[in-house]
Image: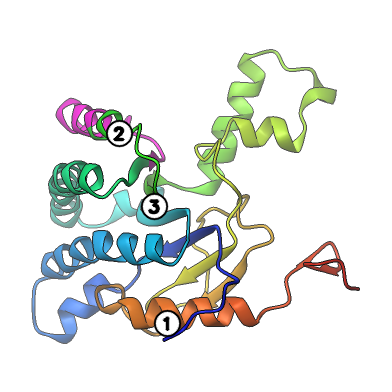
Amino acid sequence: MTVSPAVPQHLAIIMDGNGRWANNRGLPRVVGHRRGVDRIHPLALACACRGIRYLTLYAFSTENWSRPRAEVSALLRLLGTMIDEEARTCLRDNIRLRLVGSVERLSPTLQEKVSAAIALNSENTGLTLCLAFDYGTRAEIVRAARLLAAAETRPDAVTEDAVARNLFTAGSPDVDLLVRCGGEMRLSNFLMWQAAYAELYFTDVLWPDFGEDALDAALVAFASRNRRFGGLEQGGRA
């Protein structure tokens, strides 16, 4: 499929549907999560080939800690496996790896793995792959406010730019296109500051089945939109 040159610089995806994918096949939920992990690197490569510079994936939310303990433990084990795999494949494919969210609730061993993987790929110059783990916009904004308060920031210096510099995503551009898989139509506390002017795209495709055809369908939809920022279309038309 030929995709329009109007490609988002920053694509964010809510990777929903792993559990349903497994349930539909009579498999344990953890199998769906494993299949979802396997989908990450091929999609990152596909995004890089299409000119996307930043890909942020919602891997684990602040609310996900309330899931059954066995499922949370399985997800944490998968994170460790994924980090090990992505550290090697990102280095090979010139992808810069970044974590968006908190690592404070991770084990010291897992924290070390994350830090090592990020350091290993810090000089890569291709697509930036951001994994949002233990992430939620409300917690992120509270954290930014606390950092500003701790720095004794004057009230008149608390600007949008000042807040943005204290978000987990500091240094990354705002989201251009936010995709949610799995048929749900909500943002679930994901990048709500960064996606203030993003185009939204919802698909019934479950994340483990989200391949290049599904990606291209989202990009074609994005290219057809007339983006407006404060009432003007991109390009300055009223």
Question: Is residue 198 on the magenta stretch?
Answer: no
Q: Nearer the viewer, residue 99 or 31?
A: 99
Image: magenta residue range: 99-116
Residue where numbered disc 2 is placed = 118
Question: Is residue 110 on the magenta stretch?
Answer: yes
Furthest-right residue in view?
A: 238
80 horizontally vs 123: left or right = left
Above or below residue 23? Residue 28 is: above
Colour logic: rainbow
- Observer able to see residue 202: no
Packing grade of label 3 (10 A; few <14, some 14-19, many >=20) is few
Numbered mark located on residue 183 in the image: 1
- Residue 34 x, y percent position in the rendering: 14, 63
Above or below residue 140? Residue 236 is: below
Q: Residue sitting at 37 percent across and 78 percent down?
A: 182
Q: Earlier in the sequence, mark 2 or mark 3?
A: 3
Q: Secondary structure at mark 1?
A: loop
Q: Amino acid at mark 3?
A: Glu
- Observer able to see residue 81: yes
Q: Secondary structure at mark 2?
A: helix
Residue where numbered disc 3 is placed = 63
Q: CA distance from mark 2 to mark 3?
A: 24 Å
Q: Nearer the viewer, residue 120 or 83?
A: 120
Q: Amino acid at mark 2?
A: Ile
Report which quarter residue 84 is drawn in.
top left
- 3 or 1: mark nearer the eye: 1
Q: How many marks?
A: 3
Q: Residue sitting at 30 percent across and 45 percent down?
A: 94
Discs 2, 1 touching: Cβ within 8 Å: no
- Residue 110 x, y percent position in the rendering: 18, 33
